[in-house]
């Protein structure tokens, strides 16, 4: 299994909804249009009890929603590594989580694993960014 890694040049923050209501969800959805069209990476997840967003750390729309106490965020900055195999996509990928976890675990770097149908991503805190850069420079 030949895993490929690609650093994505983006700084993210984890935003989360603090005041869940239909009107506030509509307000958030209204701002997602520009995020979807202009960002190299974003992730939205949730269930009936929470709604979370990994988006650019300099998003003025979400800063406005934060001032209105609709969302909040952790001020920690996260970076992204895109992970993929040669020609394997989606549900056909086997063992990728294990392989990726073992790699980052060997370097003592905690990660959050996010995926879409065709792509896999690892998010890690900025405090580990230099270690990741050193690895990729040597590679």
Image (cartoon, helix red, strand yellow):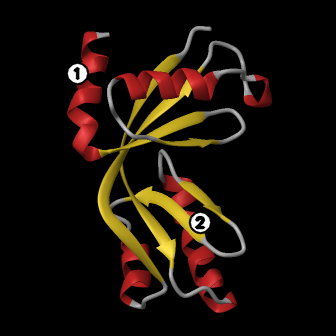
> Residue 62 appears in which quarter of the rendering?
bottom left
Mark pair 2, 1: CA separation? 35 Å
| Local SS, label 1 | helix
Q: Is residue 94 left or right of residue 129?
A: right
Q: Which residue is mark 1?
A: 134
Identify the mark nearer the N-term, 2 or 1.
2
Q: Quadrant of the N terminus?
A: top right
Q: Residue at x 32, y 10 (%)?
A: 139
Please state the horizontal and vertical placement of residue 92, each as a whole percent of the image.
78, 23
Please state the horizontal and vertical placement of residue 116, each as a whole percent of the image.
66, 42
Q: Is residue 28 left or right of residue 106?
A: right
| Local SS, label 2 | helix
CB atoms of marks 2 and 1 within 8 Å: no
Decide which of 55, 115 is in the foreground and name it: 115
Q: Which residue is mark 2?
A: 33
CA neighbours of label 2 inside 10 A, class few (<14), some (14 to 19), many (20+): few
Q: Specify the label residue 59 is tagged with.
A: none
Q: Residue at x 59, y 59 (%)?
A: 44
Q: Residue at x 72, y 38 (%)?
A: 117
Q: Is residue 22 left or right of residue 106?
A: right
Please state the horizontal and vertical placement of residue 32, each as a whole percent of the image.
57, 67
> Residue 9 appears in which quarter of the rendering?
top left
In this rendering, the count of numbered labels is 2
Q: Residue at x 26, y 38 (%)?
A: 128
**Vertical relation: 105 (above or below) 27:** above
Please state the horizontal and vertical placement of residue 65, each as a whole percent of the image.
44, 83
CA neighbours of label 1 inside 10 A, class few (<14), some (14 to 19), many (20+): few
């Amino acid at each position: 299994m030949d895993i490929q890694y690609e650093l994505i040049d983006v700084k993210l923050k984890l935003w989360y909804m603090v005041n869940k209501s239909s009107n506030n969800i509509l307000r958030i959805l209204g701002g997602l249009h520009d995020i979807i069209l202009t960002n190299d990476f974003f992730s939205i997840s949730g269930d009936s009890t929470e709604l979370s967003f990994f988006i650019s750390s300099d998003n003025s729309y979400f800063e406005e929603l934060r001032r209105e106490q609709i969302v909040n965020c952790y001020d920690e900055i996260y970076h992204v590594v895109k992970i993929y195999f040669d020609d394997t996509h989606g549900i056909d990928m086997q063992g990728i989580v294990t392989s990726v976890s073992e790699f980052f675990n060997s370097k003592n770097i905690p990660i959050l694993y996010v995926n879409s149908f065709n792509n896999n991503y690892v998010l890690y805190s900025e405090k580990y960014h230099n270690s990741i850069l050193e690895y990729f420079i040597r590679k």
